[in-house]
Every structure is written in structure tokens, then in C-alpha cells.
Image: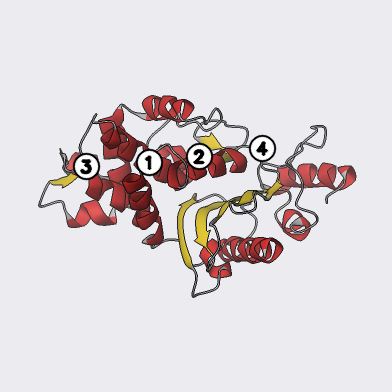
Amino acid sequence: MIDRRSLIAAAAASIAMGCRPAPDPDRQDVALTGNGLFDDLARKFYGGIGLSALDTGSGRRIDFDAISRYAMCSTFKLPLAGMVLALNDAGKLRLDERIGFGPDDLVPYAPFIERQMDRGEATLAELCQAAVTVSDNVAANLLLRRIGGPQAFTQWLRGVGDTTTRLDRIEPDLNSNLPGDSRDTTTPGAMLDTVNRLVLGDALTPASRGQLAQWMVACETGDNRLRAGVPSEWRVGDKTGTSTNGASNDVAIIWPPERAPILIACFINCDTVTARDRDAAHAKVADRILTEFS
């Protein structure tokens, strides 16, 4: 476990080196634990790593700086798809509803929408799938428009028990990841709890839970992150989030053979190391957590 002196050093270094956020050495943070599993990563990233993991079979939980805020980046697209599924469950919209779009809707990184531009429309189900599996930014913006915008999304999160996560902007502005900016942020603990409610809890019907899990398994953007630390024969699903200035996030559900699922939410924010270093850290986090839970 990192001691107070190390935390103060990490906080000072993070300000100087551009790694954000660092744990607050004056805060009595019960979530800053981990039994020494992640001390080396905290030093490498100058405090800019937070994570939460849950073995849903035993109820055992591992948290490390799990109550600091991190920019969500595209991880928000997972609970956004969950919200659309919940509204479908409630009869307030239909997954086969078609949403139109055109060139004026384009923002950077829209692999699905760009292929469908001549078609000019997609169903809500297709937009959810594109937002989760390939992290299509326009698909996410179209979903946000349909459900009432970032404030409506945040309000819905409050209704399912998430009092922490907030979305304030749309793509791509929500990825600004500015020091001290609480907009478009979550905490590792809050994100893990929300994903638990959506994929394994009672926030969705069984069919919708299965659909959300299926989209996570089909995600194409996380091969080098948490998935890389999971045995290849295990089933795993995830949703990543990335900024151009140091944020590399991943939220995953892992199904070990003949055991209950394991959930991991890992947020890394350090712009003085390479993206490859941050990806490698995700793999180490998954490997260490799975070993600890075994």
C-alpha cells in the first residue's frame, strides 16, 4: 500500500509531469487499497491510475483509488446503450426505431456511420451496437439526441443508483480530459457498480442484459487492454475509452470457467508515457486481479 509520503510525492509529480488525477494524501480514502498489487503502476503513472474489481461469486472486492474522478471518454457508451435498452424494456422507445443522419452529423471517428452515409439512417439497436463495439462517435451522439441529451443520461444514471457519474457534453468535446474538470467524469467504483447493475443486476430485463453483454463481447477496441491479461479461452467483454492527452480506460466483464463473472473498471490518466505503456498496464491489472481472485 502506498504510504502518505509516497502519495504526496505522487501528487506533486503528477502536477509537474502532466499525469492526472493523483490521490489526495489528506483524504481518508478507504478505496486506496489493493494490498500492494498496484503500487508499481501508481509510481509509473505518478498516481494516475484508479481501479475497482469485483468477484461476483465471492463478493470480494479490490479497490485502488476507486473514488477519484477520471474522464470517462468512450466508456460512457456502455451505460448509454444500457439506458436505451432500459427505455426499450419500459416501452418508451423501440430498438427497431430508425434514426436519420447526414453529413452535418459527422464528427471524427465514425466507422459505422461513414459506411452507412448513403443509407442515411440506422436503427437504435444498430447505433447501440456501433457505439459499444467500434466506439462510433456519431452513433453515440445520435443516441444521446434521441434520449434527451447528456443531462437526461445523467438523470437516468441517478435513477439506477449512480450518484457519481456525470455526462455534460457530446462527442468529441467530452474527451477534453482537463485537469480539475469534473465534466464528463466518473470514478472507477461508480462505473463498476453501474455496469454490475446493468449486466448482472436488475436494471434491465434478462434479454436486455444478455444483449448488452453480447455487445461487450463483440467490442473490437480493447484487445490490448484488460482482455490482454485474461486467458484466451475465457469469455470476456469490455468497453474502452481514450483521449489524446493521456486517458486510457477499460471496463470489462470476465467469465472464468465454471465460476461467477468478474468485473473490472480501470482508468489510467498519464500523458508522459506511451499509449502502449498504458495498454500494458491494463493487461497487468487484469492478470493480477484474476490471480488474486483465484
Percent coordinates x, y for residue 75 in the rendering: 46, 46
Determine whether the residue tagged by mark 3 lies in a helix, strand or loop.
loop
- The residue type indicated by label 1 comes to Gly
Looking at the picture, the colour scheme in use is secondary structure
Percent coordinates x, y for residue 258 in the rendering: 53, 66
Q: Is 92 placed left or right of 277 in the picture?
A: left
Q: Residues within 10 Å of mark 2 (few under 14, many from 20)?
A: many
Give me the C-alpha separation between circle 4 and circle 2: 14 Å
Q: Residue at x 47, y 63 (%)?
A: 236
> Upstream in the sequence, badge 3 or badge 4?
4
Query: Residue 194 bears which disc, if any?
Result: 2
- The residue type indicated by label 3 comes to Leu
**Residue 195 appears in the picture as rendered:** yes
Q: Confirm or deny contact between disc 2 and disc 1 (CB under 8 A).
A: yes
Q: Is 7 placed left or right of 283 in the picture?
A: right
> Which residue is label 3 attached to?
95
> Which residue is label 4 attached to?
67
> Which residue is label 1 attached to?
82
Q: Residue at x 63, y 62 (%)?
A: 281
> Is residue 230 depicted above or below 42 in this figure?
below
Q: Residues within 10 Å of mark 1 (few under 14, many from 20)?
A: many
- The residue type indicated by label 2 comes to Thr
Q: Confirm or deny contact between disc 4 and disc 1 (CB under 8 A).
A: no
Q: Residues within 10 Å of mark 3 (few under 14, many from 20)?
A: some
Percent coordinates x, y for residue 287 in the rendering: 64, 66
Determine whether the residue tagged by mark 4 lies in a helix, strand or loop.
loop
> Upstream in the sequence, badge 2 or badge 1?
1
Q: Nearer the viewer, mark 3 or mark 4?
A: 3
Of residues 19 and 252, the one nearer the viewer is 252
Q: Residue at x 67, y 61 (%)?
A: 293
Q: Nearer the viewer, mark 4 or mark 2?
A: 2
